[in-house]
Amino acid sequence: MHIDTVILRHLEMELKSPFTTSFGTMKTRPVLLVEAIDENGERGWGEGVAFSAPWYTEETLETTWHMLEHFLIPLLFQEPVYHPDELHARFSMIRRNYMAKAALEGAVWDLFAKRRRMSLSAALGGEKQEVEVGISIGIQPITNLLKRMEQALAEGYRRVKIKIKPGWDVDVVRVVRQHFPNVPLMVDANSAYSLHDIDRLQALDDYELLMIEQPLAVDDIVDHAKLQAKLNTPICLDESICSYEDAKRAIELQSCRIINIKIGRVGGLTEAKRIHDLCQKHHIPVWCGGMLEGGVGRAHSIALATLPHFSLPSDTAASANYWDRDFIDPEVTVHHGRIFVSKQLGIGYEVNMKEVERRVVRSKVYNR
Ligand code: OSB
Ligand code: MG
């Protein structure tokens, strides 16, 4: 296929409630929507998941746009694409910038699946008809946190993840465990600790957590290995895993026992699939992380999580967990902690242009 046109749109989405992690609070969420159009006028959709500031990884919405405009879209226009798997190699001359690559590759995957008259899940080799989901709850006063958990469990979410940071960890987990002794529970530090905090992290071993996500530095796998050797609770790496090679090294060093796969963080669906296959071979459980995505990013994550080795609940909660109104139809809903996988072509959801247009702050059309 020839991609003739790419349209980038920056939307500003207002979160229903602010989301606080160890790195800061978000009230609004920028979304970079990527639309790719082929020679027949068929459309594919991708979503850039970088935030407005580089506090999760180094990318931002602006750096993503820059990389797409000056490097990635020109590379896409250079030659036809026979299969989206080719793009990982084509983009590899551009260092890192994984979220930018994933946004464009995602649009091509959707287009490819639609041209093959398949769902994206089927095009990826996914098998599941439904995916299990959990919920990620931000840092907030303890009474609000408990209320939010109560509500999420009533809605059926299969596990709860709470965010921690130094000074907001062991005491909070103790209270949460007192209120919810049997709930599948995990914590995510978003890289807020160092090995100096080992006592604090070891204290978490008493609370039967499913895992501790990314306790140490974003680019570390050595200290994580030292920490994992001294913890009973499995470490799950998020920020540290940006490629197949990162995953391979982390598994070899035993830096973690679980890996969170995010399409944007690893540069796209093709690489996400490779990491999935590697982890399957090494018996490392994986699950699909979330980035407070809009509907298009959410749809891609749901499709990815239908691969057979995704064995733990995803962080892709329902649209209504984040937005008053998502920009896809239908919105993503959760029933008893499961999302039923769409059998429609491609991502399986329609982009609602009216909902998109009212949030666009900038857009630009690129032609081959
Ligand atoms: O570390 O998983 C994370 C949100 C923003 C940035 C990083 C993370 C998160 C979440 C929320 O935990 C996941 C979601 O509900 O999309
Ligand atoms: Mg995380």
Image (cartoon, grey):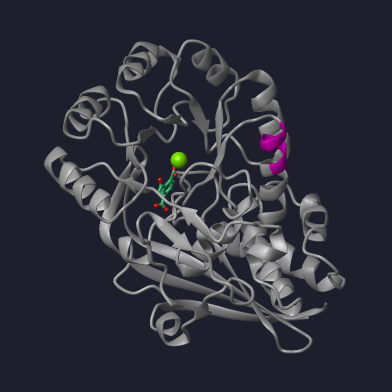
Rendered-image quadrant of the C terminus: bottom right
Q: Front-most of 322 and 23? A: 322
Instruction: Look at the magenta stretch and give its main secondary structure.
Output: helix
Q: Quadrant of the N terminus?
A: bottom right
Question: Relative to residue 61, is residue 152 depicted above or below?
Answer: above
| Magenta segment | 277-281
Q: Residue at x 37, y 14 (%)?
A: 202
- Rendering coords of residue 292 (x, y %): 42, 56
- Residue 330 lies, in percent from the top left, at 43, 77
Farthest left residue in view: 143
Q: Would you say 120 lies left or right of 289 here? A: right
Is 282 positioned to the left or the right of 74 in the image? left
Residue 181 visible in the snapshot: yes
Percent coordinates x, y for residue 328 in the rendering? 46, 76
Res 106 visible? no
Residue at the location (80% across, 66% down)? 75
| Side (left or right) of 186 relative to 296 | left
Question: Is 130 included in the stretch rendered in magenta?
Answer: no
Q: Quadrant of ligand 2?
A: top left
Camera-side residue of 307 and 359: 307
